[in-house]
Amino acid sequence: METLDYLLPQVWFGILALFLFLYVMLDGFDLGVGILSLTSSTEERRSILMTSLSNIWDANETWLVLMGGSLFGAFPLAYSTILTALHIPIFIMIFGFIFRGVAFEFREQSRRKFFWNIAFGAGSFLAALGQGFALGGVLEGIQVDAAGHFIGASWDWLNWRTILVALTLIQGYVLIGSTYLIWKTEGELQQTHYRTAKLAAITTLIGAILITIATPIFYESARTRLFSQPLVYLFALIPLLGVILIGLLLRSLDKKSDRMPFIWTILLFLLTFIGLALVVFPYIIPPTIPIYQAAADPSSMVVMIIFVGALIPVMLFYNIYQYVVFRGKVTAGSYGE
Amino acid sequence: MDFLSDTVVLSRMQFALTAIFHMLWPVLTTGMGIYLVIVEGLWLKTRNKDYYYHARFWSKFYVLNFGIGVASGIPMEFQFGTNWAPLSEAIGNFFGSVIGFEASWAFMLEAAFLGIMVFGWERVNPVIHYIATILVAFGANLSTFWILSANSWLQTPAGVELVDGVFVVKDYFKAIFNPFMLNSFLHMFFATLETSLFVIGGISAWYILNKRHPEFFAKSFKIILIAVIAVAPLQLYIGHLSGEQVYHYQPTKLAAMEAQWETTPAGQPADWSLLAIPDNKAERNSWEITVPNALGYILEFKKELSEPVQGLKEWKPEDRPRLVGLIYYAFRIMIAIGFYFAGLMLITVLQWLRGKLSAENIAQQKWLMMGWILSAPLGYIAVEAGWTVRCVGRQPWTVYGQIRTVDAVSNLPPGDVLGTLIAFATVYTFLFFAALYFGSRIIRKGPNFDLPIPGVEEQPALDTTPGEFQPDERPVEAQQ
């Protein structure tokens, strides 16, 4: 029983990390394209951008819904405390989602598209900003009592470090959005996004360096963890691999490769994600509540492994099938009819 | 204006507002999904291109609704954590896992195949497309199943044990199929279907009345009518069963629904109140019209009650719902609409049997068509009214008999909740009118008959039915 009490929360931490990673990768490019649309010079370009997302945006967003529902079921305490503590960033994200979500269809129907263009672009930006602040807030740590209930204040999550995290995440989304567009478009539009990708790669790199330096300086718990044996070697490896990946990414951009920039960016996201997960683990409400304390009853975790976990391959299968059906370059903004 | 500084009241208002708004959109998509499966199936079977254009036309409403449904659904999921943290912690073992099932079983299925259903006509063959349409409808209705299971569990919690303030699931099967579950799911399933049917029927009637593509829309009108013949009476019956369940399991709600202040013991008849002005302070109805002895017939189809109907005065004021008038009238509005639907169906069937719905006569049925146009928004009102009865009537409990609403709320500063409440109210009001505007624009524009029909070139190759004998009509010279 004892091993089960440890194993089940770890399995669920892994599954949630997978959901969150899939979300950050998929909706990351989705939101990134949205933010990039703010700089589009013509309606035609914007139409192509939105068409490249039209069939997948809600499936991409559903990974977050899945991750939220699973967090609710697997770690009810973490779901309650984190969302209460970060309710302002969460609502920023939610209102961003609302505007960008309805913009797809409303823009298509409307004659004067200006408002919905802004709703789409600014909504995407707001959603990314809210997520960045939420991520920053979690890394910063949440004030709780012994039972794990939130006792902090509404604006605890806001300081220069979380602003830095939020801006870096937005840059990361712009980067993955640009590389997605390199993959999905051609001609002039593709050329533009080779440039935006390069710019975003550099700004993301600067943000990542600053965060990497700031983390051990300002967070005591992260410091002890980062410099503990033998994890220190693993943590030393991550920035090194990161620099290599950035190099490969920039080279593929210079060589005007079609797909490699997107793939290198995904690997870069994965690496960052593993790094952050290792810093946080085994805490789910940093810096005090470990996954074992926040976990649901073992019976619920087992049932959820059967009913949610077993569906992961199926969900991945039909999501991939969707990408296969809509493979190829998007050349014109054709939405529905 | 005390409520402006009361986090409980503000959080309840926010949940009510976001739920009421969210409900408007999936109601149509879940029901219309089934209609789309029917018309696309008819197209594949008959190869009559009208059915194909029906699938294309109505799916425009589907996408419009779906987008707002997703956008307004995400706040619902996160609100449990932001505004109802103590509740979430207590019920997470069961309720949270059900939300997880809903996302993994239902949402993902619908979201992934919706892309193919809407944009994939040219990219996949018609059979794969049809499978996508079926999976979208199935996914949408599966989410009704899970969310009704979760909500029913709040009404009649079962299969769990309260350990240190947290519900631990002892029996998942009992918890998922809790006493309210099956009936509530069926009631909601038919509610979404019936609402969608009358929306489609109402819009079709509008086209028929305005003589725009009347033959085309007579087709959808007939499909709807046939479906409604089954659905409208069935829904009344399932509604009755749901009422019976409330009578057994939630006496405080039943007392509020019927504005009964005094208890009627078992074995006696009771009057049914048709209209009343309930007075919470005086604990009686200050005015009412009653139908003598009718309550027994309504609840049990017989005069004498076999169980007592407890009056509101049986409970202390803090243990019973306070908004008696709202619950009482919401219930009556829902029922009135249910009977309007059934009555409209009967009259329409009558006219059909008299041959008044034939192609040349149907546009002359002015009043009948007006009745159908009027019915388009009514389903929504009935659904919202029904949920008002269900959730306001459950008060003061969030988990009936177990967790009070006042103990379920996150301890947020009232100003924060007021801020998000105002933001939701503003944004949702705007989106509501935007959706009406764009929806009516789709209606004014009408179906697009220029869309390419997929698979048309390959059609002879696909045709495996034995062909009729076709005489060679070439000139005789050419045959030789």
Image (cartoon, rainbow, N blue to C red):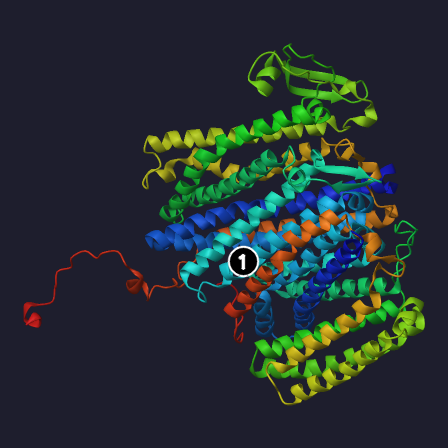
Q: Nearer the viewer, residue B478 or B308?
A: B308
Which residue is drawn at the image coordinates 74% and 44% (left, top)? B15
Q: Is residue B428 visible?
A: no
Badge 1 element? helix
Q: Position of residue A169 (x, y in %)?
A: 77, 71
Q: Chain of mark 1?
A: B
**Does residue A185 appear left or right of residue A26 in this picture?**
left
Which residue is drawn at the image coordinates 74% and 85% (left, top)? A244
- Could you say which quadrant of the image residue A126 lies in? bottom right
Q: Nearer the viewer, residue B18 or B44?
A: B44
B146 w.r.t. B458: above or below: above
Count the marks: 1
Query: In the image, what residue type sits under mark 1?
Result: Leu
**Does residue A66 appear left or right of residue B468 in this picture?**
right
Q: Position of residue A226 (x, y in %)?
A: 88, 73
Which quadrant, please, contains the N terminus of chain B? top right
**Does residue B68 appear left or right of residue A156 in this picture?**
left
Q: Residues within 10 Å of mark 1 (few under 14, many from 20)?
A: many
Which residue is drawn at the image coordinates 72% and 77% (left, top)? A268
> Where does label 1 land, which residue?
B114
- Could you say which quadrant of the image residue A49 lies in? bottom right
Q: Nearer the viewer, residue A315 or A232?
A: A232
Q: Position of residue B367 (x, y in %)?
A: 44, 33
Which quadrant, please, contains the C terminus of chain B? bottom left
- Could you say which quadrant of the image residue A210 lies in? bottom right
Q: Is residue B62 visible?
A: yes
